[in-house]
């Protein structure tokens, strides 16, 4: 089973949510497309500028995630090379669509039997679970949460757990061998995980595997990034992504 924690109401990580001067809220210290929400006047101005671009240019820009900046003048000078958060990053609907395509493959190939959405978890810090053995994924994303804890990323992450079993049928936090073995692979995998989900939790109990950054949790994060933002994933973590693709062999051709 995978527990996918959300920062929305969790007291244990409220201190990691920062309210910034420009109206954004940020999870942790790094600006990413997945750790920023809300936004103020600069966000509204960026949306207006983006809406005035040619439709083809807007769509092309929204197909991939470039490095983000909250500085309106910097973004305006290089709209194709930079992204303004929540404006020309990959839209949430597209993120869900990309995750759903892989979910369909997972069901067709027998890696997942059922996906239940809009689940109300008893633990309000949980947004998704993968139940190994019964091959069930449950999703209960909050539409007000940070993008990295919304349905697209959560589903892709939980699918990452399901497909991890392709490489390691007896997978688990204590199992060997590890998918990511070199320090570079581990560092890059962790960078993608924190990019999507913010800083690792300092918790005990059911969240200890996420806190410790287990090999399976890191693999799920790299998988999610590779599905949702393939160009950015390969730019940020080329060796970790390559290791994931090589480990899945022929299946990678269908997945990626």
Image (tube, grey):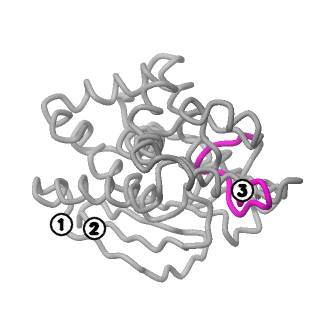
What is the distance, in whole Å, between disc 2 and disc 1 at their CAs?
6 Å
At which x and y percent is residue 249? 18, 28
The residue shown at (72%, 55%) is 45
* Nearer to me, 229 or 246: 229
* Nearer to me, 235 or 187: 235
What is the distance, in whole Å, between disc 3 and disc 1 at their CAs?
41 Å
What is the distance, in whole Å, between disc 3 and disc 2 at their CAs?
38 Å
Give the structural element (helix, strand or loop) at label 3. Answer: helix
Give the structural element (helix, strand or loop) at label 1. Answer: loop
Which is nearer the N-term, disc 3 or disc 2?
Answer: 3
The residue tagged 1 is 113
In the image: residue 236, left or right of residue 94 = right
The residue tagged 2 is 136
Q: Give the class, few, some or many, for how many residues have Cα within 10 Å of label 1's Cα (few <14, many ≥20).
A: few
The residue shown at (26%, 38%) is 168
Q: Give the class, few, some or many, for how many residues have Cα within 10 Å of label 2's Cα (few <14, many ≥20).
A: some
Which is nearer the N-term, disc 3 or disc 1?
Answer: 3
Give the structural element (helix, strand or loop) at label 2. Answer: strand
Residue 120 falls inside the magenta stretch: no
Q: Which mark is residue 237?
A: none
The residue tagged 3 is 43
* Tag 2 near tag 1, CB within 8 Å: yes
């Amino acid at each position: 089973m995978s527990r996918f924690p959300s920062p929305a109401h969790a007291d244990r990580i409220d201190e990691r949510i920062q309210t910034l001067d420009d109206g954004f809220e940020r999870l942790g210290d790094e600006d990413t497309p997945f750790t920023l929400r809300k936004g103020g006047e600069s966000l509204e101005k960026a949306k207006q500028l983006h809406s005035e671009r040619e439709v083809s240019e807007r769509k092309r820009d929204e197909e991939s995630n470039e490095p983000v900046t909250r500085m309106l003048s910097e973004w305006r000078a290089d709209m194709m090379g930079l992204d303004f958060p929540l404006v020309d990053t990959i839209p949430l609907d597209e993120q869900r669509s990309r995750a759903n395509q892989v979910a369909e493959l997972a069901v067709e190939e027998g890696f997942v039997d059922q996906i239940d959405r809009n689940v109300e978890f008893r633990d309000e810090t949980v947004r998704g679970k993968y139940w190994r053995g019964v091959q069930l994924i449950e999703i209960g994303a909050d539409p007000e949460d940070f993008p990295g804890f919304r349905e697209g990323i959560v589903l892709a992450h939980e699918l990452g757990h399901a497909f991890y079993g392709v490489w390691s049928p007896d997978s688990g936090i204590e199992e060997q061998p590890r998918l990511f073995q070199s320090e570079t692979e581990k560092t890059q995998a962790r960078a993608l995980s924190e990019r999507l989900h913010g800083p690792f939790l300092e918790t005990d109990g059911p969240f200890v595997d996420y806190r410790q950054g287990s090999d399976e949790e890191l693999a799920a994060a790299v998988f999610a990034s590779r599905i949702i933002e393939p160009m950015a994933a390969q730019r940020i973590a080329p060796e970790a992504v390559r290791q994931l693709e090589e480990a899945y062999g022929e299946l990678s051709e269908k997945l990626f």
